[in-house]
């Protein structure tokens, strides 16, 4: 499985390199005023990809962090809730004695 993963990434890198080699042209970009920037097309596409990917990735990581914090808070609350129930047995019994069930109505 690891081999297929490496093969996929190598194939993707090869395709990106092939695209870059085939489209290495300058693209004029009109900026404010009369400024014109000549940018290589692959660099422009990379910049636009990162412009869309980075904020989305940061949002996703923030939501994931918040959910992990919320989950750990709920797990701690559940552990605190279960802890007293686990120790609610008769402590007057001698160690090693087996507790027996008392039939209802017998006290």
Image: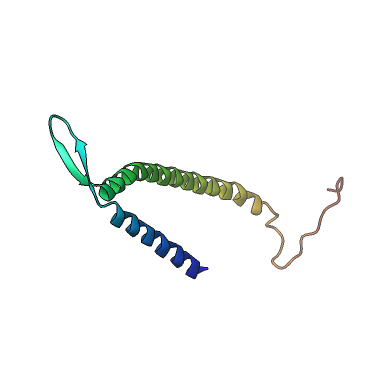
From the viewer's side, name the closer residue of 104 and 72: 72
The residue under the point 69% across, 66% down is: 95
Instruction: Judge whether 28 appears above or below 13 on screen.
Output: above
Residue 49 horizontal side relative to residue 94, left or right: left
Residue 82 or residue 50, whichever sits in front: 50
Where residue 63 appears, as percent x and y from the top left, is 44, 42
* Residue lying farthest to the left in this orientation: 34
Which residue is located at x 28 percent, y 50 percent? Answer: 42
In the rendered image, residue 23, in percent from the top left (x then y), is placed at: 29, 51
Most foreground residue, 63 or 56: 56
Instruction: Give the farthest residue toward the top.
Output: 33
Q: How many marks?
A: 0
Between 36 and 93, the residue placed more toward the observer is 36
* In the image, residue 27 above or below residue 18: above
Residue 59: x and y in percent read: 39, 42
Q: Position of residue 21 (x, y in %)?
A: 29, 57
- Check the image and tell me how it is coloured: rainbow
């Amino acid at each position: 499985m690891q081999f297929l993963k490496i093969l996929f990434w190598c194939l993707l890198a090869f395709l990106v390199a092939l695209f870059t080699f085939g489209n290495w042209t300058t693209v004029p970009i009109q900026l404010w005023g009369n400024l014109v920037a000549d940018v290589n097309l692959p660099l422009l596409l990379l910049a636009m990809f990162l412009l869309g990917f980075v904020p989305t990735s940061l949002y996703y990581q923030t939501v994931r962090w918040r959910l992990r914090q919320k989950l750990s808070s709920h797990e701690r609350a559940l552990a605190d809730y279960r802890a007293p129930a686990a120790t609610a047995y008769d402590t007057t019994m001698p160690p090693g004695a087996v507790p027996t069930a008392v039939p209802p109505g017998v006290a």
